Amino acid sequence: MFVETKKKSYGWKGFFPLIVFLLVYLGSGLFYTAMGLGGDAFKQVPRVTGLVAALLVSMLMGGKERNLEYRMDTFCKGMANEGTMIMIAVFLLAGAFSGVAKAMGGVEATANLGLSLVPAQFLMGGIFLISAFAATAMGTSMGTISAIGPIAVAVAEGANLNMAIAIGSVLGGAMFGDNLSMISDTTIAATRGCGCEMRDKFKMNGLMALIAAIVTVVLLTIVSPGAELTGDFSYDIVKVIPYLFILVFALTGCNVFVLLLAGVIVAGVIGFATGAFTLPGFAQAITNGMAGMYEICIVTLLMRGIGGVAEELGAIDWMVGKMVSRVKTRKGAEYMTAGMVSLFDLALANNTIAILMASPLVRPLAAEHNIAPKRMASLLDIFSCIVQGIIPHGGQILLCITLTELSPFAIMGANFYVYILAVVSLATIQFGLMRTKEEKEGIKMYDENEEVIALKK
């Protein structure tokens, strides 16, 4: 038990643990980049190590009125709140579904289905759409690039097409899906952080992404000539069903836990029926899929814990005070949201972590200007994915470099989709578009504690 006394506020200094994290992770990455390690530079000191360093610093802060036991208690409370635990559970279930769907051949079937339907004259636009569908279904941009990238490279080499545009088409489609997918970690983080349903964010986000995608396909068709696809693109349509199941039922508002568990069962049944795996293989696929989410779960826990320390030290109140004093309008709040998550992603090269860091900071702005939670979630997800698709030290571009041996700048310049999405999204901010019915009618969407009020549908 602690006697409640007024404790010193550290203001901006409360962010010092997070600053240490940035210095350790980003600083080491830049150092090893300068040493010539290229794509492996940011792997030398993993982000979890940087977060551990930040944790150690947070344990040293607080002064005499906050002893070590109090500091640990503060860290654990920040780490273990309800929203964080739900997010972790969803991450793990999404990993389980992805693992089982991949093990039963869903990734290859989805890719080949799209490739078999591409008209020759719309090849690059078709590759973009295939990548977009695959990423939306699978919830992973890296997995999409790994699956579709080699095919796009082979097509570009065989038909003597522009390699940068070929891989840029894959990258753009991958970021489209990473931004929209119901099982993407960015979607999970954004919706949980802003307090909205995934289907609501999907609808808000989807219109902007659809406009950008249509313009991208037209542009790719204009700048790149057609060519014939060669190779065996056979597929079993039944193996695409689990992804379609997730997409369709997510839009009905099905509970995310029920949805993902049902998805695992559907993918498992198809895997058994087609002989893709046995019972041990099914169990191992679930475990392997979850294992792929372990790092983001650990990062989420540590980040939330350190964020809880920053809040208790007064850093969040200081930041909110500075933002609120400078942001006077809804437009300003939306620009601040876009800028903050973009800055975090530029520094961290991880859009999920950028969303985790930005969402609690921009929540007060949303409440102050009564901006719909689904609009805030969309902005966080969109701008984190835009930046992730153009930074040379991001995992997606590093993977594209590995596949093509092109310079990062050539790939960045050919990722047309993210630039078009940026223009569309900024236009909605500048001209006050995408306002919800509740916003137009002045219906209050947040309570005095900045928590989202459940509105009648």
Image: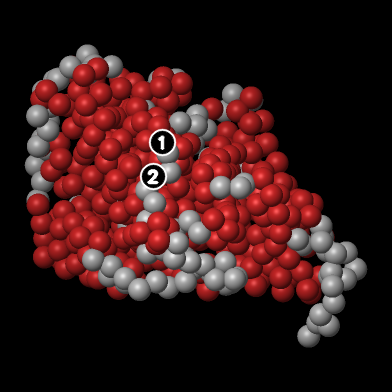
Residue topped by disc 1 = 427
Q: Are marks 1 and 2 in contact (CB under 8 Å)?
A: yes
**Residue in front for this viewpoint, 404 or 396:** 396
Q: Secondary structure at mark 2?
A: loop
What's the residue type where badge 2 is placed? Leu
For the residue pair 7 and 80, the one nearer the viewer reads as: 7
Q: Report the residue that reaches farthest toward the bottom.
A: 1
Image quadrant holding the C terminus, namely bottom left
- Whether residue 446 appears in this view of the structure is yes
Asked whether residue 403 appears in the rendered view, the answer is no
Q: Is residue 185 left or right of residue 348?
A: left
Q: Position of residue 319 (x, y in %)?
A: 69, 52
Q: Would residue 383 be found to the left or right of residue 268 on screen?
A: right
Which corner quadrant of the image does residue 276 belong to?
bottom left
What residue is drawn where x is 66% and y is 45%? 326
**Amino acid on which disc 1 is placed:** Ala
Q: Secondary structure at mark 1?
A: helix
Q: What residue is shown at x 55% (from left), y 61% (from top)?
A: 367
In the image, residue 52 sits, relative to residue 64, either above or below, namely above
- Residue pointed to by mark 2: 433
Where in the figure is residue 180, as x and y percent of width and height?
33, 49
* Numbered mark located on residue 446 in the image: none
| Location of residue 104 by image quarter | bottom left
**Residue 166's spot in the image, x, y percent?**
28, 25
